Amino acid sequence: MGRWASSMGRWANSMGRWVSSMGRWASSRDRWTISIGRWTSIMGRLASSRDRWTISMGRWTSIMGRLASSRDRWTISMDRWASSRGSWTSIMDGPAAWIDGPAAWIDGPSAWIDGPAVGVDGPAAWVEGPASWIDGPAAWVGGPAAWIDGPAAWLDGPAAWLDGPAVGVDGPASWIDGPAAWVGGPAAWIDGPAAWLDGPAACGPAVGVDGPAAWVDGPASWVDGPAAWVNGPAVGVDGPAAWLDGPAAWVDGPAVKVDGPAAWVDGPASWVDWPAVLIDGPSA
């Protein structure tokens, strides 16, 4: 019996160490829960900044729309100017005058209106020539390389970043609303079906912040959802069936092994501390 009592004492000592380690583990669990709360707060701030960014993008799109409207009005005024210039040129056609001579400054070979190096209609003209800055192939208004309407333009062309097929706001490959966009397209990371925030198939059913199956707030999320392993009803830390604090948990519940009423260490029917046990009870 002495050896048995000694072994029981050692066993009780080991159980005490085990309970102490469980306490340390519970403390680390609490710290982890606090860090998860901080992380959730950070994600909330991120979502808030995302909303503010979306609002600012809407304002920017409105500004760009007004810019495009003013650009259209400017193009109309340029057309009227070209029409009036044509009427003015038809008046200046004398054969030897200072208009049509070889050194004339309007129609001659070095004139600045119609000659090969002139500024309005010539090949280097800055209005309609092939290198002009309005309608030519390198023009910045209507030419194929223009930055407004051309194929490489940054407003309406096919490579523009606003309305073209590879552009940034409305095009199919744009970075805001297109199919590969990272905000609103089908592969976007905010609103599209593959987005990791709000989309129905985003990152799969375990996406990160706001989706229906997100891993933060969704019904199957691992933080707050009903099946989550932190706070839900079947979860692992705080839920009613959790294995830490729930009613059937193996640490603190009513049928658990350490502190419950039927526990085999400290409960009323325990075989170590109960009054009828072999070590400490009155009839031991």
Image (cartoon, grey):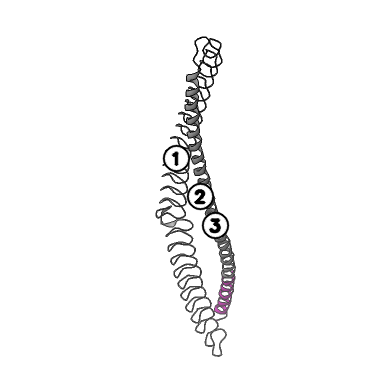
Q: Nearer the viewer, mark 3 or mark 2?
A: 2
Most frequent secondary structure within the magenta stretch: helix
* Residue occupying image coordinates x 55% and y 18%: 112
Instruction: Answer whether labels 3 and 1 touch (C-beta < 8 Å).
Output: no
Q: Secondary structure at mark 1?
A: loop
Q: Earlier in the sequence, mark 1 or mark 2?
A: 2
Report the front residue among 88 and 225. Answer: 88
Find the distance from the CA under tag 1 to the CA under tag 2: 15 Å
Residue at screen point 51% across, 39% down: 70
Q: Earlier in the sequence, mark 3 or mark 2?
A: 3
Q: Are marks 1 and 2 in contact (CB under 8 Å)?
A: no
Instruction: Give the quadrant of the N terminus.
Output: bottom right
Amino acid type at mark 1: Asp
Asked whether residue 30 appears in the rendered view, the answer is: yes
Q: Which is nearer the eye, 211 or 10?
A: 211
Query: CA separation, marks 3 and 2?
Result: 15 Å
Quarter placement of the C terminus: bottom right
Mark 2 lies on a secondary structure that is: helix
**Quarter occupied by residue 198:** bottom left
For disc 2, the marked residue is 58
Q: Which mark is residue 163?
A: 1
What's the mark number on residue 48? 3
146 above or below 210? above
User: Percent position (x, y) of residue 196?
Assistant: 46, 53
Seen in the picture, residue 45 relative to 4 is either above or below; the reply is above
Question: What residue lies at 56% left-to-right and 59% top-to-bottom?
Answer: 39
Dot 1: few (<14), some (14–19), or many (≥20) neighbours within 10 Å?
Answer: many
